[in-house]
Structure formats: structure tokens, C-alpha cells
Amino acid sequence: MAENKEYANLYRLRQSVERCPRCGKGPMVMDTAGGELFCSNCGYVVKEKIEELGPEWRAFSKEEKENRSRAGVPSSLAMHDMGLATMIGVEDRDASGKALPAFMKATIERLRTWDGRSQVHEPIDRNLRQAFSELDRLADKLNVSDAVIEKAAYIYRKALEKGLVRGRSISALIAAALYAACRDTETPRTLKDVAQVSNVKKKDIARCYRLLIREMDLKMPVVDPTKCVSRIASKAGLSEKTKRKALEILRKAAETRTSAGKDPMGLAAAALYVACVLEGENKTQKDVAEAAGVTEVTIRNRYKGLKAALNL
């Protein structure tokens, strides 16, 4: 199927140039090996270095023929070797697809073992492998995007270069790097959320986060309360109308500077509670507080402030 599509693309390319622009005759000939389109009459090359759309592999086994991917996995900072290391395959076959003799299988198995051992012989490699294994686990539980994972891996690598990991817990530092990446990408994940999915205390993660900010001179953007509205509304089971009303309240609060210096999660929860009151939705302060992970006292204080500032 892929080969038919490839030839169809080449045919369309050849048909787009019907006549030679030099002699005005034809027909045009496509050289798939050299990647050239030239005139069969005068030999004038119309296009060259045409991209080859076919696969870059030769398929020997049935499994390889079913896998139509052009290349392997992309490189990533969230891998200890960035995905660039080579590996000896598990199939005992040579380059032509023939099975290896018995005496060679033992040699290849020994080479495969030492190849795996040699990739993590440095302390830094072992550190990165342990840290990124923990990062994958945390990212899966927090359900964050690949951009956040890449940013967290970048922050941790820079911290490792500066020697900030020495004498500190790897789990705490990678959790702090993940929280810093969430803050940098404006992903609504709190420090409490990161502490709940990790086996580290919130106080230790906060200490490592402050260390990263101070030593690496990171500039974190101010958290926008509107980013937290959808999450709280989804957990509390609020309607779309109430959510839009809360976003409108938060926009007015930002214009009047009421939201300055306030906890974004508490402010978003208070705006949702105000919207529930205005829209007549039957939700208590306790329901919204549990969905937001804040106390009822916080919601009451923010509720009073919003009500007074916006004349609700």
C-alpha cells in the first residue's frame, strides 16, 4: 500500500511537468534511484534531489514487514541516553536474514549483555536513568503533556551539571523539576498534587524547588487563576454556564487588581462559588473546597473580597 502511494506521488510529479522547458518536447523521465526528473529528448534535468518517500529499511521477517515505520523513536531529553544509543537486536539473524549458527548465538548473546551493561556504567547515567524512571511515573499519574516532561528533564539535567543533586534525594529533585516545568508551561498542577503522587513530603519538594529557582535563576510566570477553573469545575460537576460566569468574574477581578497576591487555586474556587450563587446552582462551599483542594475558610475570605470589589 505504501509503495503504491509512493509511485502515485512520483507519477503526479512527472505529470505536473508535461514538456521540457528547454526544448519543448518530452516525455519526461523520472529517475527514482538518483532522485531526478529529466527530459528524454535533450537530457535537461528539470528537478533534482527529489525526496525519497519509501522506507529506509529492508524487511526480512514477517514482523518487520508489518511494521511500516520509517525510523525509530525520536530523541528525547527524558531518556538517559536521549534515545541515541545503539542496541543489539533480540533476533539471532545476520544482515541477510539468515539464522545464526549455534556457536555464534552464544557470542552474540554475550555481546548483547555487555552492550546493555556498558550503556549505564557512569554514575551520571545511572542517576539519569533512576530520575527519568521516576519522572515517567509522576508524569503518568499527573497526566501532563510531553512538553512538560521535556522541560522537567531539561531542568534536571541542568541541575545535575551544576552539582545540585549531590547530597539530595533524586526523587525530591525530579519532583521539584516537574513542578517547575508545570509552572513554566502554565500547566495547572499544584505543589500538593505533585507531593500526593510522589513518595516525598511537600516540604522537601518545596525546599528543592526553591533551590532550583535560586541556583538556576529561573523566572517563573505568575499563575493565571483562569487556568484552574476547568479543573475545579470538572471535579465538582459544575455546568458550563457556571464555569463561563466564573471566568468572567476572574477577568473583572484581574482588571480591578483584586486577584493580586492571592492563591490562584483559592481565587478560582471562590469565583466558581460566586458563579454558583449567581446562577442558582446547588453547590456548597465544602463541595467546591474539596474539588479545589483548599479550605472553606479560604473560599469565604476570597468570596468576601470578590463580592466587595465587584459589587456583586
Image: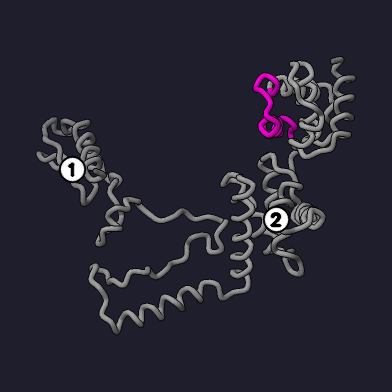
Task: Pick the residue in front: 8 or 104.
Answer: 104
164 is higher (above) or lower (below) than 120: above
The amino acid sitting under disc 2 is Ser
SS at mark 1 in the image: strand
Task: Tell me the quarter of the picture where residue 20 sits.
Answer: top left
The secondary structure that dominates the magenta segment is: helix
The amino acid sitting under disc 1 is Met
39 left or right of 248 in image: left
205 left or right of 145 in image: right
Disc 1: which residue: 30
Asked if residue 276 lies in the magenta stretch, the reply is no
192 is higher (above) or lower (below) than 298: below
The 10 Å Cα crowd at callout 1, few under 14, some 14 to 19, many 20 or more, is: many
Task: Pick the residue in front: 28 or 113.
Answer: 113
Position of residue 257 measured from the top left corner of the image (x, y, whole percent): 84, 25
The 10 Å Cα crowd at callout 2, few under 14, some 14 to 19, many 20 or more, is: many
Q: How is the image coloured?
A: one colour
Query: Of circles 2 and 1, which is in front?
Result: 2
Which residues fall within the magenta stretch?
224-243
Residue at position x 63%, y 73% in the image:
123
SS at mark 2 in the image: loop
